[in-house]
Image: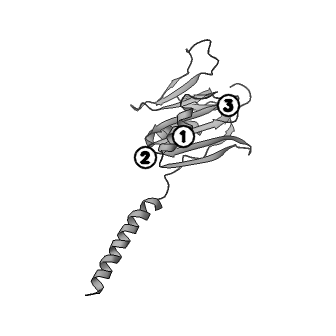
Amino acid sequence: MWLLPIIVITVMVLFIVGRLVLPHAAPPPPSPPALVVCECRGIAPGMRRIRAGVDIWFYIPEKGFTYNSGMGGPTDSLLPPVQTVTARNGSVSELQISAGAIPIERDLQFAWPVFSKHIEQRVVHYSYGSVVSMERWGYLKTGDRWRYVKFAGGGEAGYLPTHEKNAQLFDQIINSACFQAAGP
């Protein structure tokens, strides 16, 4: 008879400890693929290359994405144009790329990290070893992911929280970053 209360108490303690520990023991969400900035190569058919920064370029597929060059803003603006890429899958999410600061930079640096369930940061290198960038990304409780990359030469790229499918599409473009000192 005295064994039954001990078993009940033990089961209750294990249940409470499990509820407190297990949610925190879950592995972190997968990271975006590591970005290594290589030398630019020729432009493959069906691709376009856009500039962001002094010597940073990105490859964008012509199919499946809508590209806005950012031109057509005020002609007296000293700010570099912001180029946007939107996946043609009914989403309103967009990837922003610029030779200067992207408009969503402050949100990506200060706001979204506060609301994120998980955040990571890593250094980005040129293929020959030198540091070229710092990148940061995070996941919200909803599973939506955001990412921000700032290049030493002044370029930036990033997207606000979006579902994993769009995040993966934008990651492909971010991870296509390459360097070329002269024009294309």
- What residue is pinned by disc 1? 147
Find the distance from the CA under tag 1 to the CA under tag 3. Answer: 17 Å
In terms of image quadrants, where is residue 133? top right
Quadrant into which the N terminus falls: bottom left
Question: Residue 37 appears at what percent x and percent y?
Answer: 67, 40
The residue carrying pointer 1 sits among few (fewer than 14), some (14 to 19) or many (20 or more) residues within 10 Å by Cα, namely many
The disc label shown at residue 143, or none = 2
- What residue is pinned by disc 3? 154
Residue plotted at (53% across, 48% down)? 119
Disc 3 to disc 2, C-alpha distance: 30 Å
Looking at the rendered structure, the secondary structure element under dot 1 is strand
Does residue 108 appear left or right of residue 53 in this picture?
Answer: left
Q: CA distance from mark 1 to mark 2?
A: 13 Å
Residue 75 occupies which quadrant of the picture?
Answer: top right
Q: Is residue 97 above or below residue 72?
A: below
Amino acid type at circle 2 is Gly
Most extreme residue toward the bottom is 1
Residue depicted at x 58% and y 33%: 157
- In percent of width and height, residue 107 lies at 52, 35
Q: Is residue 171 visible?
A: no
Q: Amino acid at mark 3?
A: Gly
Give the amino acid type for the residue marked by disc 1 in the picture.
Arg
In the rendered image, residue 18, in percent from the top left (x then y), is placed at 39, 67
Q: Quadrant of residue 46?
A: top right
Looking at the image, is mark 1 or mark 3 earlier in the sequence? 1
Marks 1 and 2 close (CB-CB < 8 Å): no
First in sequence: mark 3 vs mark 2? 2
Image quadrant holding the C terminus, namely top right
* Residue sitting nearer the eye, 5 or 106: 5
x 28%, y 87%: residue: 2
